[in-house]
Amino acid sequence: MLPTMMFVIDTAGLVLRLFLLLPIYRIKVNFLDFVRYAKMMNITRQLRPSLAKALMPTAMRAMSADSKLVELTMNEKTGIATVTMNRPPVNSLNLELLQGLLKAFEGLEDDRKCRGMILTSSSPTVFSAGLDIMEMYKPKPDRVKEFWTTLQDVWLALYGSSFPTVAAINGHSPAGGCLLSLCCEYRIMCPNYSIGLNETKLGIVAPKWFMSSMLGAIPYREAELALTSGRMFSTDEALKIGLIDEVASDKADAIAKSEKFLSQFAKIHPIARKLTKLNLRHSALEWMQENKELDLNIFISFVGQPIVQKSLEKYLEGLKAKQAK
Ligand SMILES: CCCCCCCC/C=C\CC(=O)SCCNC(=O)CCNC(=O)[C@H](O)C(C)(C)COP(=O)(O)OP(=O)(O)OC[C@H]1O[C@@H](n2cnc3c(N)ncnc32)[C@H](O)[C@@H]1OP(=O)(O)O
C-alpha cells in the first residue's frame, strides 16, 4: 500500500512539476511527450534505479555518509553538497573509502534538495593517489571482487549522477584520483600539482571505462598519447589540454569557483539538464551496466598474472624508496 501511494505521489509530483515549470522555459511538451522523449533517447534505464529508490520508505533513504573516510556537508540554502575524501595520508581508494563515496553519492541521488555536488579532499597536497595498490597486490579473492565491484558502482553513481558535479582538485590526482575527477562535469585544480591516468607506468592497463571518461574531456589524439605513455600533466598543462577547466589559487578559491559553476544551473530546467547529461553519457553507462561481470572477470584475471604482481611490487618499492630518501 505504502509503495503504491508513494509511486502515485511521486508520479503526480513529476507531472505537476513538468506542467508548472516547462511553460516557464517556453518548452511545449506534455508528460507523454516527455516519456516518449526519454524512450527515444533510450535513457529510461538510467531513470529506473531512481524510481526504484523513490518507492523505498523515506526512513530507509541514506541521507548522509556516516563513514569518517568521507565527509558530506550540505548547504541547506543553496542545495550544494560537498563530499570530502578523508583517508590520510593520500586518499588512496581502498574498499572502505569507495564504499563511503558510494553511500554519499547514492544518498545525494535520493536527496531532492541536492542541486549539485563538489568533490574534494581533506589533504593539503593530494586529491587522491588513485586506487590503493595494496588492494591489488597479493589480493584476497573475496575482497578484491568486492573492491572492483564497488569501484564500478562508484563510477556508475558519479558518472551517471542526475545532479551536477564539480571536482575541486586541491592536490595530486593520479590514476583512480584522475578518474573520479573525470566523472565530474567540471574540474577546477589548484596550482603545481599533477593529474593523469598513469596506469601504464605501473605496468597495468586503464580499463575501457577509464579511457572513455578521459575521452569525455580531451580529444582522442591527446588521450591516446597520454594513456599509452602514462603521462602525468601539471596543472598548467592540464588546463591547456582541457583535462581541467579552471585553475584556482587555493582550496577555498576552488570551492568558491565550484559553487559559481554550479549556481548557473539555477536557471536551467533540472530535468532538461539531467536528461541531456545522461543522454551524452549513455553509451558508456550502458556498456558498464551490461558488462560489469565481464569487466570484473578481466580485472581479476589481469591482477592475478605474476607479471602484473611483479610490476605492482616494483612500483610499491619505488614509492617506499622515495619516502626513505
Ligand atoms: C585490462 C584491464 C585490467 C585492469 C587493470 C587494473 C586497472 C587499475 C586502474 C587504476 C590504477 C590505480 O589507480 S593504481 C594507483 C596509481 N597511483 C599512483 O601511481 C600514485 C602513487 N602515489 C604517488 O605518486 C604519491 O604518493 C603522491 C604524489 C600521490 C603523493 O606523494 P607524497 O609525497 O605526498 O606521499 P608519499 O608518496 O610519501 O605516500 C605516502 C604513503 O602513501 C603510500 N601510497 C601512495 N600512493 C599509494 C597508492 N596508490 N596505493 C597505496 N599506497 C599508496 C606511499 O607508499 C606511502 O606509504 P608509507 O608511508 O607506508 O611509505
Image (spheres, helix red, strand yellow):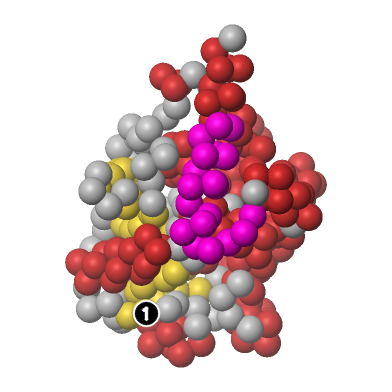
Specify the quadrant that holds the N terminus: top right
What amino acid does circle 1 point to?
Answer: Glu
At a point 33% along the width and 80% down the height, the residue shown is 247
Question: Residue 54: percent from the left, percent from the top?
Answer: 54, 29
At a point 75% along the width and 49% down the height, the residue shown is 36
Specify the quadrant that holds the C terminus: bottom left
The picture quadrant where one finds residue 314 is bottom right
In the image, 58 versus 217, the foreground residue is 58
In the image, 47 versus 206, the foreground residue is 47
Q: What stretch is highlighted in magenta?
A: 11-29
The picture quadrant where one finds residue 246 is bottom left
Q: In the figure, 187 relative to 241: above or below?
A: above
Residue that mark 1 sits on: 246
Q: In the figure, 24 relative to 236: above or below?
A: above
Q: In the image, is residue 23 part of the stretch drawn in magenta?
A: yes
At a point 56% along the width and 75% down the height, the residue shown is 217
